[in-house]
Image: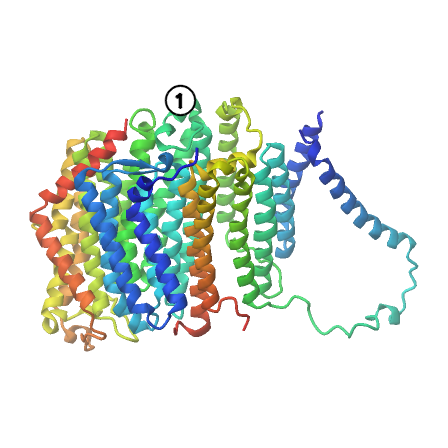
Amino acid sequence: MISITAADLSGISPALHLAVAGIAIMLLDALWPMRSKLLSVWITLAALGCSLTTSLHRLTAGVDVTLFNGAVRMDGYAHAFSAIICLASTLAVLSAPKYLRLRGVHLAEYYALLLFSVCGMVLFAAAEELIMLFLALETLSIPVYCLVGFTRTNVYSTEASMKYFVIGAFATGFLVYGIALLYGAAGSGYLVDLRAGAARAPGLFYAGMTLLLVGFLFKIGAVPFNMWTPDAYEGAPTPVTTFMAEAVKAAPFGGMIKVLFVGFGFDAAVGLWQPALVVIAVLTMTVGNLTALVQTDVKRMMGYSSIAHSGYILVGILAASKLQSADALAAVLYYLFVYVLMNAGAFGILILFSHKDKDTNAVEDLTGLARERPWAAALMAVYMLSLTGLPPLAGFFGKFYIFSYAVKAGYVPLVIIAILNSVVSAYYYLKVIVAMYFRGPEDTGRAAVFHYEGYSVFLLAMLWFTAWGILYYGIHSEPQLALARLAASSLFATAP
Amino acid sequence: MSAEKVAFFILSGLTLGGGLAILFSVRLMRAVVYLLVSLFGVAGLYILLNAEFLAALQVLIYIGGITILMVFGLMLTGPGQFVNPAESRLKAVAAGVSSLTTAIVLLLIVKKTKWPAGTQALAGDTTAEIGRLLLTDHVFAFEIASVLLLVVLVGVALFVRLARDGGKP
Amino acid sequence: MLSPYLPILFQLILAAGFACALLVLTHVFGPRRSTDVKLSPFECGVDLLDCAHHRFSVKFYLVAMLFILFDIEAIFFYPWAVIFREEISQGLLLLSEMGTFVAVLLVGFIFIWRKGVLEWA
């Protein structure tokens, strides 16, 4: 029986808004190219805002609908991820116009690609079935490959795009192979049916699970599948790096957690994926942090820092899987929310001081910032301290919740390693603060100029909002956590 | 031996032989032709498996499209022979060992598995069955596939534009 | 089960056999009296200038890429067309489903057209 009902369309509307807005921007740019740039910024912000408010509204209302014959499910979990991703993308879009205008590549394509990617991200957390999961992942990834190469005249940008694309395609290969084997084992593509494959055809099931996990770990940049991260972060235009560091970072976790908890479950398969993830989490945290220590470029450093944070998030996922409690999973969602704010802000400062011919990327470039631009330096200090995990900033509470649930789950050695890693990470985050506050042009021997080129209200609004969020949502984390708990419990309702 | 078995051995011979020939050919253009042979063998195997639609897809997209794309890709580069980029023996050994282990592990798994799909009845007309699934259970995936294709079109347009005029509108 | 494919097999054998036979026949029956004049390019040709393997323009690749994209789009029509008659009671819905799919790609087509991707220059 073929049927698409109005309920299907309205249920999926958070993703639909984005796709339709992307298509609208393309038509606008094709038919009316003179006016399309500014309009497309507004269309993008409107679409993201619509999706964000719809998702939040439905999350609080407890909407839980299965759509399109079970291919997609918009429950609290999917709505929460949709909200986090739309927020992250809004922040990334706010930082874009200034930079792209300076580089002379302010094109409507940027916004269309970004919207399609966000649409894929929303669907990735909502997919209930392997084909949908794969299509959502591709819709999420391919626009980002293009966005990384957006300043094509820049050879680093092109190289980063190429590298990211080749490695991303490789990871997709793993994922598709895993999907094929899992389908062979379970005889069904629906996530809830996958577990049955473990008893039916164990060899196929475990091989498929391993391959699928490898694909996911590539996407989240976990060690040893992290080699693309620093190059792609460094080479991409800074607003795209912002987008990659928050939205593209958070989205794969949406699909991954769902596949782990609902697809593989906690009965038979857990004996394999939990120990594997413990090893990967330790490696990811340690390698990420140690490599970040020696970086002199902030974008590259943030690339390694994002690898390390993937490790912390994996610790949270492990704790949630062991405790099987919605509270522990809520801590992961809260962490992702906070992580989005911190990263958007840190890259925003780099964009703020980018010039027509030169980016401000090196740690050295920020030397003496506090004397000339005290407010900008103060904002950057907030982001860096929050990334380190200093109380009372939101970054501290994010880590605190994750680590305390991990202790409750009995992962004490893992938490000790994570805390040691946080201490190590303080060195490179504080390096930025030291450069801004305690060093001046006399130390580096060259005068740094901090003037705003191409003033952007959007960018300033984004910076102030993220800093306010980090200060406010740290202390008042309870409403966010309550929402996250609502989301997490809807996932556990379907998990075994 | 039944006709099906004969066809199976010929087709897998084409697939594997083509693959090996790619591995040992020095000229890339020839490797592409061998790839054509290998893909053709796969298309034949699909027919043996009663997957006619998949076979048609294989011929139309892989044989008719992807290999042509590869030929154009090769024509972008200058003449010359393929230089083996494996600079160290260690890397070659590591690659060989890892691919062999993967192959053996997969072979063992395939051998040990009792395939659940083997017990199910075949659909009469697979193309119609795929069509029905595509427009019922997977209708949303079908529509999202169009968005995915659209994304690729935008990407193509973007890079052409940036290459042509450095991004001036 | 394989019988519908017999004509295809025959055609393949015929094509391969014909090509091989022509090659063999020319070698067997063709008189071979090579002189310098005979080995030079025949009247219709000019002397060899340089290697035949030139670098081609990237535009060819672009066209091939666009071809594949629309090829994939066309592939989706087959299964749709096969069931259309059987499910004619829901024809309008089927039509609108395919209509949406095509409309989305039509936007892409208009886009690349207006952006000058299809122009050769």
Q: Quadrant of residue A453?
A: bottom left
Q: Is residue A226 left or right of residue A434?
A: right
Closer to the camera in the image, C25 or C101:
C101
Q: Quadrant of the N terminus of chain A?
A: top left
Give how far across and how far down residue A436 sits, in percent. Answer: 14, 67
Q: Secondary structure at mark 1?
A: helix
Give how far across and how far down residue A121 sits, in percent. Answer: 32, 48
Closer to the camera in the image, A51 or A169:
A51
Residue in view at x 18 percent, y 36 percent: A328
Residue in view at x 15 percent, y 45 percent: A398
Q: Is residue A485 left or right of residue A228?
A: left
Q: What colour scheme has been applied to the protein in the rendered image?
A: rainbow
Q: Is residue B11 left or right of residue A376?
A: right
Residue in view at x 22 percent, y 43 percent: A80
Q: Quadrant of residue C12?
A: top right
Give how far across and how far down residue A179 sits, in percent. Answer: 43, 37
Q: Quadrant of the C terminus of chain A?
A: top left
- Give the answer, above or below, for where A100 lies relative to A64: below
Residue in view at x 48 percent, y 24 percent: B116
The chain that hosts pointer 1 is A
Closer to the camera in the image, A191 or A246:
A191
Q: Quadrant of residue A224?
A: top left
Amino acid of disc 1: Ala
Q: Which residue is mark 1?
A: A199
Q: Is residue A302 visible?
A: no
Q: Is residue C97 visible?
A: yes
- Give the answer, above or below, for where C53 lies relative to C22: below
Give how far across and how far down residue A206 sits, in percent. Answer: 40, 30
Q: How many marks?
A: 1
Circle 1 Cα neighbour tier, 10 Å, few/some/many (<14 / 14–19 / ≥20): few
